[in-house]
């Protein structure tokens, strides 16, 4: 079973050093690809493009650049895609993005920009030979009126030329399986495209808040209860026990997803390698020697 990891653009030199430590750790584990998120509204644009280009040129990894429509005209979006192409990047995860500052706030398109990710998929595909992925939402996107409408919009992005989707993070595997069934029932051709589940090992109660922000929803009560039990009743959270429970939960979810035939496991790393490598070790992934070239 292939796995892949998500990185975030570093904000400063120290963050960049930390990212590279994680990159070198993962490089030894041969992920299928690594993705680099795009900061809200292009706040870290130059650093993001430069570091993603370095991943393409200076590592053995296959980078996937996230691209969002927030605050960009179509001309700027085209030029960003051009900058990625110049750095040797051919894989782009196309997203609309959220309003900067408040992800749940009102969305305003750029006056010369796009309204939906579907339009950006077409733009990127028209620009050249890019492999395009899109976002999918196991519990539906928070702005979609219902799950059927959400499925129709996801299918439209796939029909526009996306080859796969990566899901929003989730903590109940049933939600992923139901998403997969919905897309297959709505359109068997598009439903055959890979839906890659996104996982994040929880390492502290503070990461619970981050996870809920990224899920756009509270964690299932059974998961929360398990983490809170591990944290204990003392004045200080039992960090080691919460971390162990978080790794165990991610491992169990990954095992079920493998059993259910998920095409790849995509891990949010927050630019740290340790927690994800522990889950991968539990699953039997080891550090493999680099393939010998003929
Ligand atoms: P869209 O597919 O455009 O959907 C946006 C909303 O419009 C949805 O409610 C949808 O149902 C609705 N909609 C879609 N098409 C239509 C239509 N034709 N008519 C009417 N309504 C429609 N954000 C970042 O800022 N940077 C990142 O790097 C980033 N990476 C992400 C990676 C993953 C795997 C995921 C799941 C999300 C990521 N996000 C990122 C967050 C993402 O940008 C937000 O969730 C955003 O709100 C939705 O993006 P989208 O591409 O799904 O938008």
Image: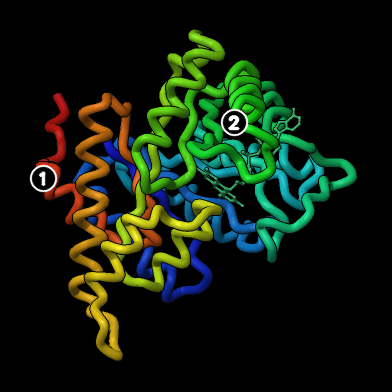
- Measured as percent of width and height from the top left, residue 9 is found at 50, 60
Residue for badge 2: 147
> Would you say the beta carbon of the disc 2 residue lies within 8 angstroms of ligand 1?
no
- Comparing 250 with 294, the one in front is 250
Residue at the spot 45% in from the left edge and 18% down from the top edge: 193
Q: Is residue 10 left or right of residue 141?
A: left
- Residue highlighted by disc 1: 286
Label 2: which secondary element: helix
Residue 140 lies, with reference to residue 17, above or below; the image says above
Real-space Cα separation, disc 2 to disc 1, in angstroms: 38 Å
Q: Is residue 134 above or below residue 10?
A: above
Q: Nearer the viewer, residue 14 or 157?
A: 157
Ligand 1 visible in quadrant: top right
Callout 2–callout 1 Cβ contact below 8 Å: no
Against 55, residue 94 (above or below) is above
SS of the residue under disc 1: loop
Near mark 2 (Cα within 10 A), the count class, few <14, some 14-19 or many ≥20, is some
* Nearer to us in this view, 29 or 170: 170
Front-most of 273 and 79?
273
Q: Quadrant of residue 42?
A: bottom right
Please tell me which residue is depicted at 70% across the width and 60% down the height of the picture: 100
Specify the quadrant of the image occupied by residue 223.
bottom left
Q: Earlier in the sequence, mark 2 or mark 1?
A: 2
Q: Is residue 288 left or right of residue 22?
A: left
């Amino acid at each position: 079973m292939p796995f892949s990891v998500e990185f975030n653009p570093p904000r400063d030199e120290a963050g960049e050093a930390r990212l590279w430590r994680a990159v070198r750790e993962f490089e030894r584990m041969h992920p299928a690809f690594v993705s680099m998120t795009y900061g809200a509204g292009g706040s870290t644009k130059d650093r993001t493009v430069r570091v993603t280009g370095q991943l393409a040129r200076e590592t053995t990894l296959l980078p996937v650049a996230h691209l969002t429509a927030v605050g960009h005209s179509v001309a700027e979006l085209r030029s960003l895609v051009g900058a990625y192409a110049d750095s040797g990047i051919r894989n782009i995860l196309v997203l609309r993005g959220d309003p900067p500052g408040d992800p749940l706030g009102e969305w305003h398109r750029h006056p010369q920009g796009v309204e939906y990710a579907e339009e950006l998929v077409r733009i990127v595909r028209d620009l050249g030979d890019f492999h395009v992925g899109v976002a999918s939402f196991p519990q539906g996107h928070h702005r979609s009126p219902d799950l059927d409408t959400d499925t129709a919009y996801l299918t439209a992005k796939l029909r526009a030329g996306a080859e796969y989707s990566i899901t929003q993070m989730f903590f109940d595997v049933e939600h992923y399986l139901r998403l997969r069934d919905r897309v297959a029932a709505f359109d068997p051709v598009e439903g055959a495209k890979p839906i890659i589940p996104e996982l994040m090992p929880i390492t502290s109660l503070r990461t619970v808040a981050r996870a809920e922000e990224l899920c756009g929803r509270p964690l299932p009560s059974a998961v929360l209860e398990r983490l809170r039990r591990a944290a204990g009743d003392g004045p200080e959270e039992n960090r080691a026990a919460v971390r162990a429970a978080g790794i165990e939960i991610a491992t169990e979810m990954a095992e079920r997803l493998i059993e259910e035939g998920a095409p790849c496991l995509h891990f949010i790393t927050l630019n740290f390698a340790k927690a994800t490598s522990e889950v991968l070790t539990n699953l039997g992934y080891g550090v493999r020697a680099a393939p010998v070239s003929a």
